[in-house]
Amino acid sequence: MKHLVIALAFLVLTPAISKDAPFTIKGIVKDKQTGQTIPFAHILVGEIINVTNIDGEFIVSSADFDKEGVKLKVSYMGYETYSTPLSNLDNYHTVFLEPSVTQLEDVEVLFGPSIMDAVFERFHLNYEMERQHMVGYYQESMSDWEKTYYVAEGIMDIYAPSNLDKNAYPLVNPLRTRKKVFEKIDAIDEVLGGNASDMAQSSIWRDQSFLSPKNRKNYEYFYAGATSIGGHDVLIVDFEPSNKKGNTKGKLYIDEESYALLKIQYDPIIDDFSFWESVTWTEEYEQQDGIFKLVSVLFKGTSTNHQYDYHALLVINESKVIDELPTDIAMMDAYDSFFEMAQEDFTDSFWTGFNFMKLDNNVARLLNADASRY
């Protein structure tokens, strides 16, 4: 795990477990024209956020839904936003997203440096700066070209300090965890542990990030086109180092109206790491009540011998502003393992009272095959 923390340097409200049976929404998201499923689409129901899995499937559960007054909203870059009342949903709802057409008319903003000037000027307007209490679903796995070595998941109670406090990291309390090791390898002990604390702090506010005031001057920005989301134009800006102090390259997706970052995709430039050959980070944001909040963080890493691929995902399902960080809850630091007490129960009922991501079909088949051996 320490290697993942180093890689990052380059750069949730605990839901009450209701005694009432939760109202659960299940479904799948597809492209209306091609019928292909859409992974990592944003699912919004009231104040709860989730994303689709690699197979395009989603599940959202809560005992607090007002079925008559709340809508299911689904969005993804390059598509029109889908919205329908919960009362219209069946047991398993298929959402078809319509590809959107981008018509960007304001040619005066089509210069990378000027776009980024507007982005940086609006940081303190677009993003939350106060202390946050979040609940998030976390998943990590390791595989090679032919098999998966392990899958680990958890529901994480996260307390994030003010984004103005650049020297403090989010505190994490694992509420429920499970894991399955299919085949033991030495690298598992080194990596398996959990990285939700690091992932909950976005690149927008991280002091060592390429977006921080002291580092952003080390990069060049190039306008790279446009896309859309929900009928809103989205500018695409590529960036790369302009000098030896720059250590990251990637792509930024920026709302043309607010100049908020909706998606950040970047690759730290690795020269001398002992474990990672390459890493890729993807952060996505969603607007709620005028503030753009971190929704998901995806990490992909390939080992130096190209033998192992490591994936980690954090989805922040709920968040709210709090006055103070708790002092009476046992929290884990960045090097503690989330999964020392993890269970091996891989039924959906294990997550009762929490929101989670449905396991993808390949992992589900692997779990079923493993169980059949006993």
Image (spheres, rainbow, N blue to C red):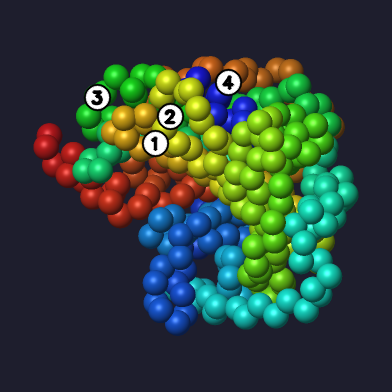
- Give how far across and how far down residue 130 sits, in percent: 83, 37
Q: How many marks?
A: 4
Q: Determine the residue positioned at 39% across, 19% down.
A: 190
Q: Determine the residue positioned at 73% across, 76% down.
A: 104
Q: Residue furthest left?
A: 373
The quadrant of the picture occupied by the C terminus is top left
Q: Which mark is residue 302?
A: 1
Q: CB of mark 2 within 8 Å of CB of mark 1?
A: yes
Of marks 2 and 4, the one in the foreground: 2
Find numbered disc 3 in the image and state the secondary structure of the residue it sits on: loop
The Cα–Cα distance between marks 2 and 1, rounded to whole angstroms, is 6 Å
Residue placed under numbered mark 4 in the picture: 334
Compare residues 67 and 320 and report the one nearer the observer.
320
The Cα–Cα distance between marks 1 and 3, rounded to whole angstroms, is 18 Å
Find numbered disc 4 in the image and state the secondary structure of the residue it sits on: loop
The Cα–Cα distance between marks 2 and 3, rounded to whole angstroms, is 19 Å
Q: Dot 2: within a 10 Å radius of its alpha carbon, few (fewer than 14), some, or many (20 or more) residues?
A: many
Instruction: Identify the mark nearer the N-term, 4 or 1.
Output: 1
